[in-house]
Amino acid sequence: MAHVTPVHTSRSVNEHVGAEVFFKCENFQRVGAFKFRGAYNALSQLSPEQRKGGVLTYSSGNHAQAIALAGKLLGIATLIVMPDDSPEIKQRATRGYGAEIVLYNKRERTREELGGKLARERGMTIIPPYDHADIIAGQGTTALELHEQVPGLDVLLAPCGGGGLLSGCAVATKALNPACEVIGVEPATADDATRSFKKGELQTVLNPPTIADGARTPSLGELTFPLLLEYVDEMVTVPDTSIVAAMRFLWERMKLVVEPTGALAYAAIHSSKLKRKGKRIGVIISGGNVDVAGVAKLFV
């Protein structure tokens, strides 16, 4: 089962942004990211026949680890299709949880194409990273816990890649606290969800060049897109420079090991791209799986 993760606060952060900020620290979740919530929820509801056949997914890292660990705990074989440039730390962790990994060149083929082919050949069930009802429901428990831990939030900020976390948390938030404003945050170079939200039509992006690897998804999904349109109030984007600045602040001032995607939501208010003075703001830190050597280069 998933951990109930802590909420951290910082006087320095509150002074910097002029608001009360509450960090929901999913970097302390199992596998170091919120992804375990959805993965375990999805795998635990498979039929005996599906469990016997095993599960396949495609992921750059955190969902891969989450499916691998959930499979290990539930006795389900797992196969992960990962891009060959995914962080080595995430590949090692995924293998460490007992999953088989198939690497691919994302410039030559899509993960969906390769994953579908392998699933058909092996008779496995595909559990995608975000566009799956049980995944979305599991990710939504992040906000469910946060609202129980910190009642009366005015704003909830969540990072957005494929929209599983954001849509799940938006649904939970509007059910528990309809007045709470839900805002999704994307990297400026991977702004497909923001463009989709503003235009009302699904937009795409191909291999966006951002350090936030968890947000390099090509588009929102068939399930997550309409949920965002209905339950999310606003979408904003931030450049990679702002992500690095927010990440460094969290490391140095709060001693929180956060990966670039994990710092994405906070970057919106740290950089003053988004201002909510005097408000009670919940910020979801989505994960902390980061290559320390790589971080050292970012912080130079």
Image: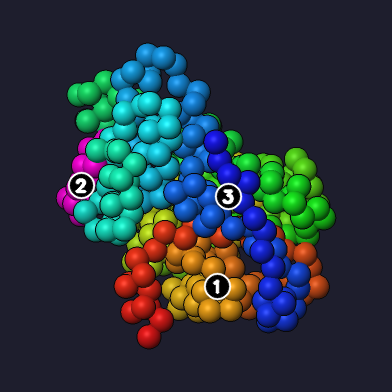
Q: Secondary structure at mark 2?
A: strand
Distance of label 3 from label 1 (alpha carbons)? 25 Å
User: In this view of the protein, which residue sits in the foreground, 37 or 171?
Assistant: 37
CB under 8 Å between discs 3 and 1 = no
| Residue 102, picture quadrant | top left
Q: Secondary structure at mark 3?
A: helix
Q: Looking at numbered disc 2 in the image, what kind of residue is underneath it?
A: Leu
Q: Secondary structure at mark 1?
A: loop
Magenta part of the protein: which range? 101-115
Q: Looking at numbered disc 3 in the image, what kind of residue is underneath it?
A: Leu
For residue 187, say whether it is visible: no
Where does residue 231 sit, x and y in percent of width and height? 67, 46
Instruction: Classify 10 Å Cα crowding around label 1: few (below 14), some (14-19), many (20 and above).
Output: few
Instruction: Classify 10 Å Cα crowding around label 2: few (below 14), some (14-19), many (20 and above).
Output: some
**Looking at the figure, which quarter contains the N terminus?**
top right
Distance of label 2 from label 3 (alpha carbons)? 28 Å
Distance of label 2 from label 1 (alpha carbons)? 33 Å
Label for residue 103? Answer: 2
Q: Compared to 248, does 236 lie above or below?
A: above
Q: Per the image, is 35 magenta?
A: no
**Looking at the figure, which quarter contains the C terminus?**
bottom left
CB under 8 Å between discs 2 and 3 = no
Label for residue 255? Answer: 1
- Label 2 vs label 1, nearer the camera: 1
> Is residue 274 rendered to the left or right of residue 89?
right
- Label 3 vs label 1, nearer the camera: 1
For residue 175, say whether it is visible: yes
Instruction: Classify 10 Å Cα crowding around label 3: few (below 14), some (14-19), many (20 and above).
Output: many
Q: Looking at numbered disc 1 in the image, what kind of residue is underneath it?
A: Lys
Count how many numbered circles sit on residues in the image.
3
Tell me the residue at 47%/53% (across/down): 32
